[in-house]
Image (spheres, rainbow, N blue to C red):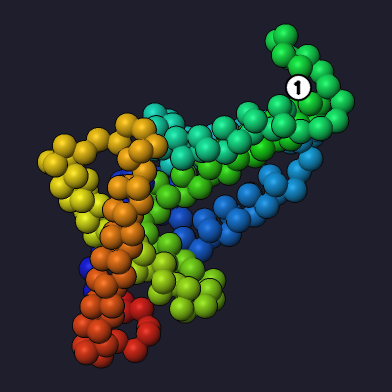
């Protein structure tokens, strides 16, 4: 259980950002995100400064911009929600490109989009310059409760295992001619998700029993 595991988000490199201590990077990310969230969206120069500082860190990390941009697709749900706010919010109305929208909703949408983008980019920069194992070490050094570190450690180690199980289930469904095209197929997807959960839970029990039988006491092994 002590073998290192790579991660699909990690970009191998030897930049100063890669070599920085993981606990310092975690504290920097936390401080940056809290500062961005606490800054009123009306303070536009502050957000320009945040973006400039973040771009400097990205440049120092030697991580290609395209590598990060491709992975920022995770932000899409937040952007979709932000795009809906001007239409569902109440308050004074204004015209934007010939469309009447709520002024408070528009301000909230812009704030959410800007802050989410900065937060996601900062998080991806951390993930691409820090191995998961190093992140766990950093959390331990920051005195995060051991049980939480253990849960995250197991999640990192077995995420690929669950992903492979999901891939096999998708192949099995495809081999039987199943293609999700409309809501009529949602029950099949739901049953597949339930089966995946049961299999993952049972696998977790077997792994835990095997570890206990080998002397596991709840402490992360070096």
On screen, residue 7 versus residue 206, left or right, reads right
Camera-side residue of 127 and 197 = 197
Instruction: Tell me the element at label 1.
Output: strand
At x 22%, y 56%, the residue is 165
Q: Which residue lies most toward the front here?
A: 184
On screen, residue 29 versus residue 73, left or right, reads right
Camera-side residue of 120 and 135 = 120
- Is residue 78 in view from this perspective? yes
User: Tag 1: Cα neighbours inside 10 Å, few (<14), some, or many (≥20)?
Assistant: many
At x 40%, y 46%, the residue is 128
Q: Position of residue 59 (x, y in %)?
A: 47, 35
Q: Considering the image in quadrants, where does the C terminus appear?
A: bottom left
On screen, residue 76 versus residue 211, left or right, reads right
Q: Position of residue 99 (x, y in %)?
A: 72, 14
Please say if 166 is above or below 50: below
Camera-side residue of 77 and 15 = 77
- Is residue 45 in view from this perspective? no
Image-quadrant location for residue 1: bottom left
Q: Position of residue 159 (x, y in %)?
A: 31, 59
Q: Which residue lies most toward the top here?
A: 98
- Which residue in the protein does label 1 denote? 101
On screen, residue 59 versus residue 173, left or right, reads right
At x 53%, y 74%, the residue is 144
Image-quadrant location for residue 186: top left
Please say if 169 is above or below 45: below
Please say if 5 is above or below 34: below
Image-quadrant location for residue 171: top left
């Amino acid at each position: 259980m002590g073998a290192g595991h790579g991660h699909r988000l990690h970009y191998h490199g030897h930049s100063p950002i890669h070599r920085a201590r993981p606990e310092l990077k975690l504290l920097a990310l936390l401080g940056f995100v809290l500062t961005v969230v606490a800054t009123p969206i009306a303070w536009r120069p502050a957000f320009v400064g945040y973006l400039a500082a973040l771009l400097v860190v990205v440049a120092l990390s030697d991580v290609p911009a395209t590598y990060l941009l491709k992975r920022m697709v995770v932000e899409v749900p937040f952007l979709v929600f932000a795009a809906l706010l001007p239409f569902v919010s109440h308050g004074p109305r204004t015209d934007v490109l010939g469309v009447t929208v709520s002024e408070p909703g528009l301000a909230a949408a812009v704030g959410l989009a800007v802050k989410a983008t900065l937060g996601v980019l900062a998080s991806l920069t951390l993930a691409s310059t820090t191995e998961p194992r190093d992140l766990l070490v950093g959390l331990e050094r920051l005195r995060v409760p051991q049980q939480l570190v253990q849960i995250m450690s197991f999640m990192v180690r077995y995420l690929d295992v669950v992903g492979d199980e999901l891939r096999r289930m998708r192949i099995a469904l495809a081999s039987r001619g199943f293609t999700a095209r409309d809501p009529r197929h949602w029950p099949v997807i739901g049953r597949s998700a339930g089966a995946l959960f049961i299999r993952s839970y049972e696998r977790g029990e077997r792994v835990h029993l095997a570890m206990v039988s080998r002397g596991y006491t709840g402490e992360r092994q070096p």
